[in-house]
Amino acid sequence: MRDRRAARIGCTTAALLALSACGGGRDYRPVSDVPVRIGPPYAVRGTTYTPAADAAYDRVGYATWYGPESGNQTANGEKFRPDGITAAHTTLPLPSYVEVTALDTGRRIVVRVNDRGPFAGGRIIDLSRGAAEQLGVKAQGVAPVRVRVIEPSEKDRERLREGKPARDLPPVSGRELETLQARLAAGR
């Protein structure tokens, strides 16, 4: 009887220890839009990045996507959710909201930036797996995109904070898509 009780207590203790390890011992910041964090300059692989607010940010370049292999915690302290509609950017405030347009199709989505990266030349944003799937670029790995800062509605912000997509946006017009593709080709 005593041996069974001791074994049960031992199993219970082991299970509790195993479950407590699942959290990784990290204190995650709640998903929130406040405070907005800009942060000091930082260096990665010999390149210095200077975070700054830029309401006029509008760039073309390349997007990549990242999944659970990136780690558990985002740069602003939130728990990383690979299926959420989030992204990493080297300098925009955390969080920021951007509209990402796939330059192959004209498809557009709204994404919440809550992490830092990408740290590879020519890439301007790292999308979460969920964002890459929603934009339709996951299979490509690297895709030409336009990224511009926006101020979405509170309803869209709320949905993105919950890990859900914002409202659907119509694709850009054929003419605008041609202009964006020309900007990319010209390196602007």
Image (cartoon, grey):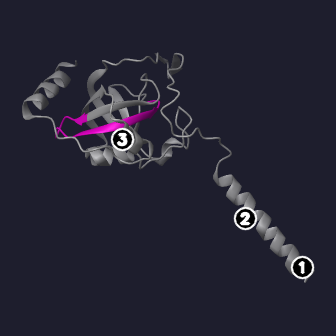
User: Label 1 crowding class (10 Å Cα cut-off): few <14, some 14-19, many 20+?
Assistant: few
Question: Quick check: can you spot residue 78?
Answer: yes
Dot 3 or dot 2, earlier in sequence = 2
The magenta region covers: 101-117
Tell me where residue 168 appears, x and y as whole percent.
24, 45
Q: What type is the residue that disc 2 sits on? A: Ala
Please, which residue is most extreme toward the front here?
Answer: 154
What residue would you read off at disc 1? 3
Dot 2 or dot 1, earlier in sequence = 1
User: Label 2 crowding class (10 Å Cα cut-off): few <14, some 14-19, many 20+?
Assistant: few
Dot 1 or dot 3, earlier in sequence = 1
Tell me where residue 173 appears, x and y as whole percent.
10, 34
Q: Which mark is residue 15?
A: 2
Picture layout, residue 176 above or below residue 171? above
Tell me where residue 37 appears, x and y as whole percent.
51, 24
Residue 109 lies within the magenta run: yes
What residue would you read off at disc 3? 155
In the image, taking residue 39 as reference, residue 187 lies left or right, namely left
Please, which residue is most extreme toward the right here?
Answer: 2
Please, which residue is most extreme toward the bottom here?
Answer: 1
